[in-house]
Image (cartoon, rainbow, N blue to C red):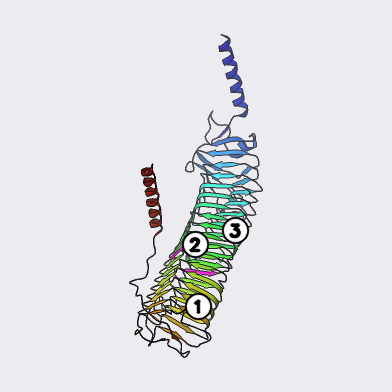
Amino acid sequence: MRMLQFVLVLGILLAISITVSGDLVVDDDTGTWMNYDNIQDAIDNAADNETIYVYDGVYYENVIVNQTVNIVGNGTNDVMVYSPNDDSTFNVSADYVNITYLTVESNMTMDPKAAGIFIEWADHVRIAYCRVNDTEIGIFGYYANDAVIEFTGVYNCSDDGLYITHSQDVTMYQVRVENCDRSGIEGWHSDGMTINYADVYDCNTDDGADDGGFTFHYCDDLTLGYSQGDTNKRFGVLQRYAEDTFYYRNTMEDTIGGEGFYISSAVRVLFRWNDAYQNDGIGFWFTSANDGEISNNTAEDNGEHGFHVNGRGTLFADNNATENGWTGFYLTTFSGSDIVRCWAVNNTSASYDGFHIEYSRHVNITECVSKGNGRDGFQFLLYYGINMTNTTMADNGRYGLYLWALNGGVFEYNEIFDNTNYGLYSSASPRNITVRYNNFANNGGSSSQAYCGKDENNTFNGTGEGNYWSDWNGTGNYSIDGSAGLADEHPQGSIIPTSAPERVPEFAFLLVLTMMFIMAIVYRRREQ
């Protein structure tokens, strides 16, 4: 009996507790289950950290969220909150607010600073599983530190889809933005932003000069990963003035009238495994991108250059430029950089090269391939101090290697074959050039596969051994065409290659590693 009394008292106390601090229900249909018929009244009467459940319906109101609450809708297709005037539909000014499972709309004639959801001077706000339609700006964060926007779609905005300014450490995950007049996602003066799995389509329909799919200005420590931009105008990605940014596994394609990626004045950029396909302009365009790494990226079938890079002290490795309208790799003022295992293939315009490198100093090129390009495999202009080794130049429309006004360079152990004109052509007073231990096979030209217009301490010899020439007659020197009157004094018979090497797909490396790992396990078990 005493136990039954104890249970009854406990149940009464629990019921009182639930009544005092229980969740609130909003429904535009009257009934005993609901507390309020509009969201604002529920917020005004809620305790801190209370949850407000919003039932099915359309709610015409401007919601002021000025205390910490959780606003939970029944689902984005069932709960719509609609601004009846020029103000934001939601204006959030309290920390640790959660808004989930709602559709937010407006009348599209909002104040320029208004938005579907406006977060102002509020930290740790979370927007999730929401849909924002037909607003001025979809979601606007202003001093919205540590905000999280995830599993949310923004559509048909007359300005930006997501606009973040003066906010630190904002996170976006699995967001989708479509058909906004300006940028899909835009950031200004916001450091530490992390964006993963964001898709932005058909944005910048007004064709603004500084807008595109993703645009960032003065945003340091930015991370953008596993995201996609498609059919945006002007830029897939535009970033200006930033340090320590990290881009990985993003794809920008079909940008209308502009570039896939445009990164300007960015220091210590880490750019890996990104793709630029079928953009009207340049696939990847970097200006003043210093002391960074650009590796394992692919530019294919873009209207202009595959890569256009201006910067110094950059590791440029394992990049691929294929079937672009202009040059595969256009590198300028690229001093103090290493170019390793990069491929320029079938960039077939007759006016452009596989690699064009100019106004640069002290660059090392190793294990690269340039084949099937419209003009030269490699073209160097006004260059000082170049070292090229183990690189292939084949099947190009003019020269395999073109040197213009080059001062200081060593070219050794390279494969230069089947180019339409000379394998190597050097003009405009080249000086201090050493060409040795290379394999020249079946290149065009006049009476030689190489040309040098002037001799200023240039040589085609190594120590007791020169280059391999497929057309050497087996005796004497190998004469080099041109007024310099040079010769290879130690020519060798050519080691004629059968074809240029093919780029090995990424999955092949993974397959080899997996097989090696399995074999190691089997061997160890046998030893045991």
Q: Earlier in the sequence, mark 3 or mark 2?
A: 3
Q: Residues within 10 Å of mark 1 (few under 14, many from 20)?
A: many
**What residue does disc 3 label?**
244
**Mark 1 in CB contact with mark 3 (< 8 angstroms):** no
Task: Look at label 1 and name its amino acid.
Answer: Phe
Numbered disc 1: secondary structure? strand
**Mark 2 in CB contact with mark 1 (< 8 angstroms):** no
Q: Which mark is residue 295?
A: 2
Task: Look at label 3 and name its amino acid.
Answer: Asp
Pinpoint residue 112: horizontal percent, then vertical percent: 61, 56
Numbered disc 3: secondary structure? loop
- Residue 300 lies in the magenta-colored region: yes
User: Residue drawn 54% across and 38% down?
Assistant: 72
Pinpoint residue 274: horizontal percent, then vertical percent: 48, 60
Quarter of the picture containing the C terminus is top left
Q: Which mark is residue 380?
A: 1
User: Residue 182, can we see it?
Assistant: no
Pinpoint residue 187: horizontal percent, then vertical percent: 59, 57
Q: Earlier in the sequence, mark 2 or mark 1?
A: 2
Q: Is residue 162 above or below residue 391?
A: above
Task: Look at label 2 and name its amino acid.
Answer: Ser
What whole-number distance in Å separates the C-alpha atoms at marks 1 and 3?
30 Å
Q: What are the residue bounds of the magenta stretch?
A: 297-309
